[in-house]
Image (cartoon, rainbow, N blue to C red):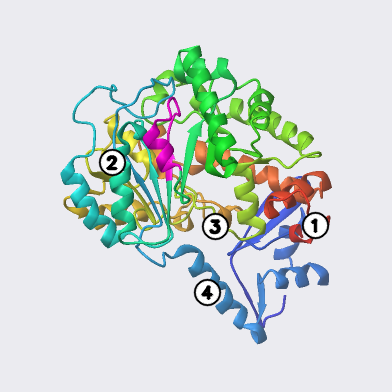
Amino acid sequence: MNKNSTLTPFRFRNVSDKLLLTNEIGKFSFYSDDLMSRFYDDELSSGEIDSLKQQSIIVEDSEQWKLLSLLRNTRNATKSDSEKLSYLMVIPTLRCDLSCSYCQVSRAPINAKGFDWSEDNLEMFDGFIKSNGSNGMKIEFQGGEPTLRIDLLERIIEISESYFTDLEFVICTNLVTISDDLRKLLEKSNLVISTSIDGPESTMTANRTEDTSVSKAVIENVKWVIDNYGHSKLSALPTIATDQIDHPEKVIDYYRSLGFRSIFLRPVNYQGFARKSYKELSQQIESWQKFWLQAMNHILKISKDDYFEEFYLGTLVRSIFADRASGFVDYASPANYASHYCVIDHDGTIFPTDESRMLSRTRQIDLSIGNLEKGLDREIISRLNFNAIHHTNEDCLHCAYLPYCGIDIIDDLSRYERFDISKTTSWHCQKHIFLFDFIFEKVANWDVEWLKLFNSWIHRSQNTSDALQIFK
């Protein structure tokens, strides 16, 4: 490295027997594990220097434009282009006709009063969506069980479509019943269903329904939606509880039997009331890692004959190698709470995320950021976002995976009752370090079998080229 050059920020981590270096915007390369000792002794080979130049870690004075390019890309990765919402979650009712063992919120009994949106809330929502909505926005109906109030869903859809022409609606429903009114809504081309399938009927009964006949009805309704509208109309995900933690193949194979080509393996959340029923399971990172590795090996095996994806790992792979944003507010830095996403509860209270709604429902901490009547509290939102920037966090600042990751202060508050903890000890950090190590170990060792699988996920197709240059 000569005197007429600039050294830009970089981060490193030992992966297998190599040293992974990442630059400020996530461009990576592998080097011999003694690189850093030789780096400071000025003993790098010409090939290593050239590689560092290609990463824009070493920038010659004659190529100062590279610094401007890095700055522009860094700013684009961290700024919020607009404060208009692109994703809105609405809770029209907190009432529910199930009592799931891992429910994360305080659902209300099906005949309870005072847990639905009022006419006033609908009128105030009109003004809120007009001011804060945008074309291309997704509106998700959660609960409770939102299909208990199809009339409210219809009104909210009508109001939203009076202002915007490009919208997508998602109804998160347990699919215990499909009423005639719901059937009519399903005819909308821009409306889809999301539901929970934890596995076969016995698992559904243990985790969710407590009634074999209800479990059977749910599965029959899932099949009805698929048969009549195809898989594009319905998405599903499991919550991995005690019954499944030792048998990942069981839930994966069941999803395949229903024709799904993707699964989002999701542990029991440590928010709301779920942590009372699954206090130990929701904290055991080792148990989850063991389950996950067993699941991934099974997916690798079945993917030799058919396309199948673990959704979250696929999301990480695409964000690293194809530069595609994940869309997860708890995965971005800064999180930009209430800039792109927020949640409106059954009483009109607004929260930055659904998980923060759960914390408020259990009275652990009030993370509300406004309400439909008074609007958003920008001062509270600013404080939350200030603490959700990993670029300035002392534990994240030197992490090689910083360009691909984020801080989840909501999960930290739930688990540790504060977010100024050492991030390296947090569930969120341990989970993601484990996942990133898994990905980059496959690249470091040039594990072709895994790289071909990753490549299929990037292109979302099994019929992809065997060329793997994207991982170099």
Q: Which residue is mark 4?
A: 72
Q: Which mark is residue 152?
A: 2
Cα separation, mark 1 vs mark 4, equals 28 Å
* In-front residue for pair 394/434: 434
For disc 4, the neighbor class at 10 Å (few under 14, some 14 to 19, many from 20) is few
Q: Amino acid at mark 1?
A: Leu
Q: Which comes before the other along the chain, label 1 or label 3?
A: 3
- Single out the mark in the foreground, 2 or 1: 2
Q: Amino acid at mark 3?
A: Ala
Gap between marks 4 and 3 measured at Cα: 17 Å
Q: Residues within 10 Å of mark 2 (few under 14, many from 20)?
A: some
Report x, y in % for residue 425: 51, 37
Q: Residue furthest bottom?
A: 62
Residue type marked 2:
Leu
Stretch in magenta = 170-186
Tag 3 residue: 325
Q: Is residue 37 left or right of residue 240?
A: right
Q: Is residue 242 above or below residue 8?
A: above
- The quarter of the picture where the C terminus appears is bottom right
Residue 367 horizontal/vertical position (percent): 28, 42
Question: Which picture quadrant has residue 382?
Answer: bottom left
Q: Position of residue 165 (x, y in %)?
A: 39, 62
Q: Nearer the viewer, mark 3 or mark 2?
A: 2
Q: Which residue is mark 1?
A: 468
The mark nearer the N terminus, 4 or 3, is 4
Q: CA distance from mark 2 to mark 4?
A: 44 Å
- Asked whether residue 180 is drawn in magenta, I would say yes
Q: CA distance from mark 1 to mark 3?
A: 21 Å
**Residue at point 72%, 75% (across, down):** 1
Residue 45 appears anywhere in the view: no
